Amino acid sequence: MKTIRTHAAAAALLLFPLAAIVAQPAAAQHAVAAPAAVRSLALDSSAGLAPGAVLRVRMAATPGARNANVTLGKSGVRIALREQAPGHYVGSYTVRRADRIDPRQRMTARAAWRGGTTVAQGFSFPPAFQALAMGNAARRDRQAPRVIGLTPSNGDRVEERGRTFIHARLADQGSGVDARSVRLLVDGLNVTGDARITDDEIAYRERLGRGQHSAELVVRDHAGNVTRTAWTFRVV
């Protein structure tokens, strides 16, 4: 009975009015033909992202698009939209058991008009989807993130050619890498603010003098598991 109540509460959490979950794009829109634009995107579900759940998408955009669709992160799921009323596009999708939809990723809306195509990136899933996914992943996740392919590698010798490039790949199979937690120290100095950090990599360039140098990388996942990697290299 407790399990039934838990699933019912999760479903109820997702079934709030669409007006409450309208997302705004985090990235700038790239439009070929002004003033064609995607203004907002809304998503709700009958049962979260469980197999058999029906996802409903509503998009507000310039009227008259010849075709439009929404892609759900990197899952490969693309939902076709039709214009229900001028400027209002709708579509639906039934989640399949084989689908791997990650609500921590972003949605992308595309629409084509006579003058060209608009791609609006960076729409977030509604917070309720993210909260459920993060909570489930965090409860299962006991493995710390992995740091892969250090550049320079430990003990490596690097020729002094302008700025030294420091790079690492980040991976986590559980709750995912928390990019905001990543810290990079070079010779004891916190250089995180000057590094380029994503969910799966960190890159940093700096003009380092000849001699021995140290680096330390601290990475956490969303479940709180932490990995600390320290290494040294020499600039010659």
Image (spheres, helix red, strand yellow):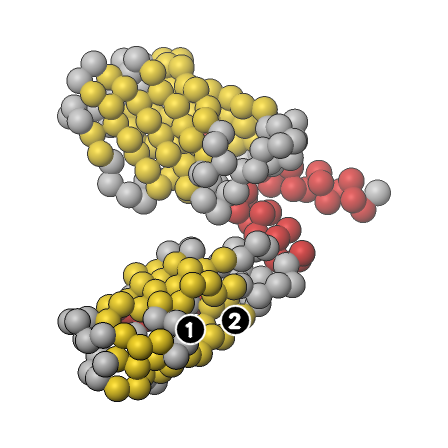
Amino acid type assigned to the residue bearing label 1 in the image: Leu
Query: From the image, which quarter does the N terminus lie in?
Result: top right
Q: Are marks 2 and 1 in contact (CB under 8 Å)?
A: yes
Q: Is residue 157 shown left or right of residue 130? A: left
Q: CA distance from mark 2 to mark 1?
A: 8 Å
Q: Residue furthest right?
A: 1
Query: Toward the viewer: 207 or 1?
Result: 207
Residue 227 numbered mark, or none: 2
- The residue at 42%/73% (across/down) is 217
Which residue is located at x 78 percent, y 40 percent? 4
Res. 168 image quadrant: bottom left
Please tell me the numbered disc located at residue 198.
none
Q: Residues within 10 Å of mark 2 (few under 14, many from 20)?
A: some
Q: Is residue 157 above or below residue 68?
A: below
**Whether residue 145 can be seen here:** yes
> Which residue is more in the foreground, 158 or 128?
158
Where does residue 139 sit, x and y in percent of width and height?
66, 57
> Height in image: 135 above or below 160?
above
Percent position of residue 92, x then y: 51, 21
Q: Amino acid at mark 2?
A: Thr
Give residue 33's quadrant in the image. Answer: top left
On screen, residue 119 versus residue 35, left or right, reads right
Could you tell which of marks 2 and 1 lies nearer the N-terminus? 1
Q: Is residue 45 left or right of residue 62?
A: right
Q: Which residue is mark 1?
A: 217
SS class, disc 2 = strand
